[in-house]
Structures are given as structure tokens and as C-alpha cells.
Image (cartoon, helix red, strand yellow):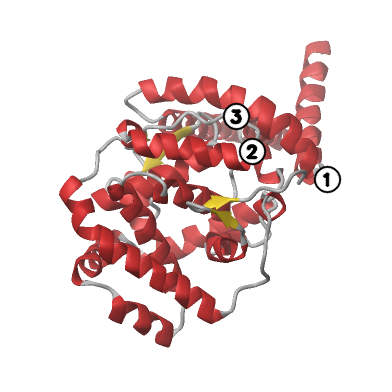
Amino acid sequence: MGSVSRRSLLEAGLIVLAVVAALAPVPASLVERWYSTRLYPLVQHTLTPVSNLLPFAWLDVLLIAAVASALFALIRAGRAAWRAQRPMIFLVSVWRVAAGGAAVYLLFLTVWGFNYRRIPMEQRLVLDRGAPASDAVVQLGLEAVERLNALHAAAHAAGWVSDQRENRALREAFTRVQASLSDASPAVPGRLKRTAFGPYFRWTSVDGMVNPFGLEVLANPDLLPFERAFVAAHEWSHLAGYADESEANFVGWLACIRADVPTQYSGWLYLFWQINGELGADGRAALGSALAPGPHADLNAIVERLQRGQLPRLRNVSTIVYDQYLKANRVEEGIRSYGAVVTLILRARFDEGWTPVRRGNP
């Protein structure tokens, strides 16, 4: 009886602790100082090298095992409750599954999730301007067009490596960008892995994600060669503790445009895609008319890839679910945080070579 009581108390404690961890306000400066720049790098430097060695995705095993265990426990308890005509048997099983979910949530926060609560990029950098006007966005888009037109031939001639960890220029640029933004030790780059959820990525137009429990990178199997460098840099930025999507886009883009020519092309291609999606018809027409045939063909190839694989209804549901996930983790903009990178680029102060100027004491 005592052991049962102790177990119930432990389960109740896990649930209460998870609720407190989810709702309690924690100063961003405290998270930055003790978690994002101290504890988290130790965790990342341990888990990512191990996951890089594995040819399969940790998340596949973890998720399948967790779902199967929960379903098995609930089905077995449901049958037992039906036979004994005692609903409490099933309710106890639900309670234990809830306690297990609370433990998983606490593990998520410890391994990666607290990065959502670190100092935001707007407080980390010197910002010179307010919200950008539409003409400033068009001008940045035209700069992206200019860079794409200039880089296209050389980028395609050089080609792209399949494993971006072998891209020394990108790795070094990624390290330099991290050093300019935070006092944390540089993150270990992750291997872009195939996953059993690849079809889901295809159907919902997801390019990649980080497994928050194993700190590994999972990628859409259909990514085109000129997309992979930016996707890798974006996901590596998540591994560096930049959980917010706009911040990961910002850090990944900065790393790309400071690397070699093929990687620069990948970064500018991403930025053009982002800006083009945020402009009205006139702005898109201005960018499209200035774009050379080569980059235009690459963008058409991306559109074809997306249209070939996506299931619009599933994609819409996935977008809603991810939007709620981001908001639950205190990203108030939700899915709109993806596009906030353009505002961040236009507001931040940069030194030579697109080096962001960091505040002394954010």
C-alpha cells in the first residue's frame, strides 16, 4: 500500500511540476545565463555527436515506442475495466499515461525546450530602425535577386555536397556567427537524416526539423541540392539553441551568406523565397522581372517539388497544430515567426560582411 501511495505521489508531483514549468514566468536573462549558455551546450555536445553516428533517426524509435506503450497500457486497462466492471482501472491507467506525458514534457524542457524562453534576438542585437516599410522589403528582395543572378552559374558549376557537415566553409561561418551572437560554446553540426516521417514531411511541405530529445536533424527526403545548405544551417541554428523559427532563419541565413559560393546561393535563394511570399502582386512582379532565367528555373523546381508531394488538407492541419505548439512555447507570433526574419534583417545594425552588432548587456 505504501509503494502505491508513493507512486501516486510521484505521479502527482510530475504533473504538478510540469504544469508549473509550463506556466511559471522565468526571466529570460536567467534562462540565457544558466541554461542556454551553460547547461544546454553540454547537453548538445553530448547528444548530437552520438546521434550523428547512428544511421537511423532516434525520433523514429522514441516516438513509435512511446505511442505504442501508451496505447498498449490504455487498451489493456480498458479491457480489464470492462471485464471487472470497474472504470477506475481505466482511469488509473489514464492518470499514469498523463504522468508519463508530464515526465516527457519536463525532459523536453531540460534537453531543448527552455531555449524558447531565452533572450530574444531583438534584445540581443543593436536595432537601428523601426518596422520596415514595403519599399525597404522590395529593396532587400532586389538585393537577393542581384546576388542570385551573380552567383547562379558559379554555384551550379561547383555543386553542393550531400552531407553539409563536410562543407568546411559553412561550418566555419556557422561558428563565427554563433560567436557574434552569444557567449555559448559553438554547437556541433548535425547530420541531415532520413526518417520514417519523410512522407509526412513531403505531404505537409516541411523541409526539416530537430528532434528535441535526441538533438538530431531530420530532413525532407525530396530537398533539392541547392536547398540543403540553407536547411542544414537553419536546423543547426536550432541545435545552437535558437528555438524561435525567425531566429533560426536569421542565424542560418547569416552563416550561409558568409560561406562559399554554392552555400551563399542557397542562403540568398531562401531569402528571395521568403520575401517574395510576403509581397503584394506589384512587389512580386518587380522581383520576378529582375530575376535571371537560371535562378528562376531553380525556384520553379522548388515549386514543382512542393506541389508534387503535398496534401493541402494535411498541410493546413499540420500548420495549425505547429502554430499552437509554437504559441504554447511562448512564441506569440506562432507560425508567423517564420517571416519575422525579414523584419529582423532590415532592423538590425551590421558591420562589414553582414556581421550583426550585438548589444553589450542584453
Image depth: mark 1 or mark 3 in front: 1
Instruction: Inspect the image, locate mark 3, and give the three-letter code of the amino acid beneath it.
Output: Ala
Position in image of residue 103 (x %, y %) = 67, 29
The amino acid beneath tag 2 is Ser
Q: Residues within 10 Å of mark 2 (few under 14, many from 20)?
A: some
Where is 135 relative to 94, above or below? below
Asked if the residue at tag 3 contacts the one at tag 1, i.e. Cβ–Cβ closer than 8 Å, the answer is: no
Which residue corresponds to mark 3? 80
Q: Nearer the viewer, mark 3 or mark 2?
A: 2
Choose mark 2 or mark 1, whichever is in front: 2
Question: Residue placed farthest to the front in the image?
Answer: 352
Q: Earlier in the sequence, mark 2 or mark 1?
A: 1
Residue drawn at the location 34% of the way across and 56% of the way down: 203
To which residue does mark 1 refer?
A: 25
Q: Residue at x 68, y 26 (%)?
A: 38
The answer to whether any part of residue 241 appears in the image is no
Q: Position of residue 318 (x, y in %)?
A: 48, 58
**Is disc 2 placed on a helix, strand or loop?**
loop
Quadrant in which the N terminus is drawn: top right
Is residue 107 visible in the rendered image? The answer is: yes
Which element is circle 1 on? loop
Name the residue carrying label 2. 182
Q: What is the distance, in whole Å, between disc 1 and disc 3 at their CAs?
A: 42 Å
SS under mark 3:
helix
- Label ID, residue 156: none
For badge 1, the amino acid type reads Pro
Of the two numbered discs 3 and 2 on the same chain, state the one appearing first in sequence: 3
Q: Quadrant of residue 285?
A: bottom left
Q: How many marks?
A: 3
Give the mark nearest the N terminus, 1 or 3. 1
Establish if 355 lies above or below 33.
below
